[in-house]
Image: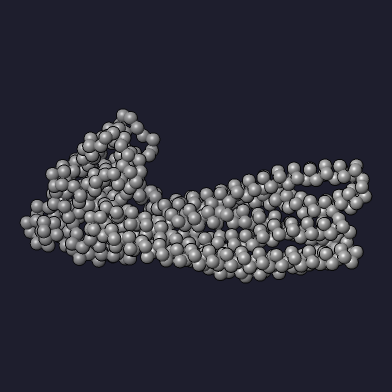
Amino acid sequence: MGAGELSGRDVLTRSVKGQVRRVALGSALGCVHQLGEALVPVLIGVVIDQAVAGQKAGRLVLWLVVLAVMYVTLSWSFRLGAKAGERGAEEAAHTLRLAIVGRVLDARGGAEVGRLPGELANVATEDAKRVGAVNMALMSGIWAVSGVAVSAVALLLISVTLGLIVLLGTPVLLWLGHLLSKPLERRSEAEQDRAAHASGVAADLVAGLRVLKGLGAQQAAVERYRRTSRISLAATLRSARAESWQTGLVLALTGGFIALIALVGGRLALDGSLTLGQLVSAVGLALFLLGPLETFAWVNAELAQGRASAARVAEVLATSPAVVDGDDPVAEPVRGELRLRGVRLGGLDGVDLALRAGRLTGIAVTDPAGAEALLRCLGREADPESGSVELDGVPLSRLDPAALRAAVLVAAHDAALFEGSLAENVTPEDGSQGGEADLLTERAMAAARADEVADSLPHGTATGVGEGGRSLSGGQRQRVLLARALRAEPSVLVVHDPTTAVDTVTEARIADGLRDLRRGRTTIVVTNSPALLAVADHVVLLDAGRVGAEGTHAELVRTDATYRTAVLA
């Protein structure tokens, strides 16, 4: 079981008791409020019959005091109940967001497969909010049920006929409201799907903005997003139409139900079966019932949308891990010897490869798919379809993924910088600073030539790099990313094309800095850069998914035509 899953499950478990208590408290306070609301028209009827009609001033004052106390109770019970409900909804949404983020960050991966980053963000925000709002909807539904129950009892005491109309008619209204919410649920789910996809496309386009401008493909990108946005808009409008129809029809049914109660009450008053005060109470209770019955309509709509969002949240949380779990800790100290035995995955076709500990190994490829598959295996983003990968003789599948990631760092060439200063992006957030920690940062920055980037910025390392590092050029971002990987000081460092956007002079200096800083520790550079391969202790050529040649860079340039074509062409 991965650390991310444990965290998400733990958060959900710890939250359950608190949520139940808040729902119970909010429901109790809401029921008190509804009881008071239902009793107000009853008390007014009593005042009319006993004080006004009887012209007894003393009783009138007494009942007015009772009404005043009732309104104070109504005010405070509503405020406290609403507060408990809103807090419950927000905390439930917050808990779900933590669970979703925990699943996405789970070391075993899998949640991001087939989903754009914007889609996951939409699930963690909008869907989590809608599911959290179910807490408030449930409490409101309980309030409404208590209001209808109190009104029915009061009407039964006034008139058995009126009480039976409420008791028999309310379940019918609830059933019809549930049926009318079904189209809304389906269209709400479609709306959220399309909205999430539109968010994902937007985030994807923004992330690749520089590339799009360089290719002159801005217009094509705009058209792509316009099509996606139109589809999302159409889904939103269909959901809005379904909600308006559902709300309108439920309100029409509710209005007819209230009119029926008023009509029967009026006829009973004309027959002399009800006093003037009782008629006023009956009409007041009928009007009061509008609130609970309208609440039922709102609750149905909220539950329909909440169910649709809950399905999307559950889909993310229940996503199968990309790799199998392992429980064994990584042995200390880590020697850093990696071995691939008959590995097949993507562009790898039965690779047998020994990467010795303590040396800098360069890996050149003739097919980028082979490099991608190799990085996924070494970073344990995916397990091989067949074969195995070992660290110090232990298969990676037996090791805890989180512990493995701490020992083996795979620095992808397309990794992102975080919004903040350059220093914050390079220095690990472990609280280490001053003395040795500062020296390590300086050495990593110098090796990656990121110190030159800092010198060119207005506030040095304190300069903000913007969202995703967009205030930096491509070459500057690469140097900062390499500095961050070097500063982490992993036992095994795997870097992929760290210098594709820098000039040849800087690339050669970075190659020397990387070799010197990582001397004696296992380092793997997956690249076709001659400058980086030239400083490697050993070079491997992956050709057509298999090991094609091994040796030093100079030897392979001299003896292997395929290597020369891949590296020097």
Task: Determine whether 272 is above or below 432 in the image.
Answer: below
The reply to whether residue 246 is in sight is yes
Measured from the top left, where is residue 545 in percent x and y? 22, 64
Measured from the top left, where is residue 343 in percent x and y? 28, 63
Chosen colour scheme: one colour
For this orientation, the residue located farthest to the top is: 435
The reply to whether residue 398 is in sight is no
Residue at image coords 61%, 69% = 180
Residue at image coords 82%, 64% = 265
Measured from the top left, where is residue 428 in percent x and y? 35, 40
For this orientation, the residue located farthest to the left is: 558
Lateral position of residue 460 relative to residue 77, left or right: left
Pick the front one: 464 or 165: 165
Q: Quadrant of residue 363?
A: bottom left
Q: Quadrant of residue 514?
A: top left
Lateral position of residue 392 relative to residue 106, left or right: left
Residue at image coords 77%, 54% = 38
Lateral position of residue 401 relative to residue 559, left or right: right
Q: Quadrant of residue 448?
A: top left
Task: Determine whether 354 is above or below 406 in the image.
Answer: below
Q: The C terminus lies in which quarter of the figure? A: bottom left
Residue at image coords 23%, 58% = 215
